[in-house]
Image (spheres, rainbow, N blue to C red):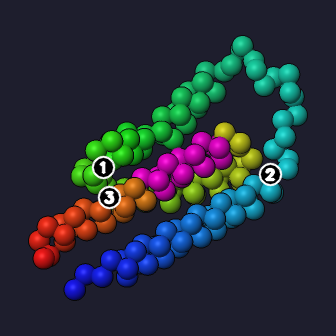
Amino acid sequence: MFNPASSWNEERHRVRFLLLLTYAILFVALLSLCGCGDLVPQDTSALIDPNLKRSEVVGFVGGLGATFAAVPDLRFMLRCRSSTGMSPRMAAIMGIFQIIWIYYGLLIASRPVIAWNMIAVLINYLNVYAYRYFVRQERADAGGLFGA
């Protein structure tokens, strides 16, 4: 028999777990960034330089594209309120490798690599969370239609 109170408690427990997981990930990310004290720009007059090198422009455009590549999936899921067509496995794999890219950015002391990939990890985390949320909603709707 369906018990709405237990379902609500389970959902509340899951949300609490996801919040704690999010805080733990943010804490580790902030802790790793604390070691980036030497990433302060030495030549501040060159921060906004009209004579950018082609490699810097290509790197910026590549980082922008790779970072926001998962946004269309997230937008589609939120607009349609459905998990149809989304691959959470791909988003999770991308998120794992973006965390490795963040570590690489720390090793080479590259703030753009760190920043772009931290944004991308957040977007992929939101993708996986939205997917899980909509799958649960779809299962609950299907159970309500056929489970009586």
**Horizontal placement of 81 versus 146: left or right?**
right
What residue lies at 13% left-to-right and 76% top-to-bottom? 148
- Calculate the distance from the C-alpha at mark 2 to the C-alpha at mark 3: 38 Å
**Residue that mark 3 sits on:** 134
Amino acid residing under circle 1: Arg
Q: Is residue 38 magenta?
A: no
- Calculate the distance from the C-alpha at mark 3 to the C-alpha at mark 1: 7 Å
What residue lies at 47% left-to-right and 53% top-to-bottom? 126
Amino acid residing under circle 3: Phe
Give the foreground label among 2 and 1: 1
What residue lies at 84% left-to-right and 40% top-to-bottom? 40
Give, as a single range, the part of the protein colored magenta.
113-127
Query: Percent position (x, y) of residue 139?
Result: 24, 67
Tell whether label 1 touches label 3 (CB within 8 Å). Answer: yes
Q: Which quarter of the figure has residue 1?
A: bottom left
Amino acid residing under circle 2: Cys
Q: Which mark is residue 36?
A: 2
- Compare marks 2 and 3 and give the one earlier in the sequence: 2
Q: Secondary structure at mark 2?
A: loop
Tell whether label 1 touches label 2 (CB within 8 Å). Answer: no
Q: Which mark is residue 81?
A: 1
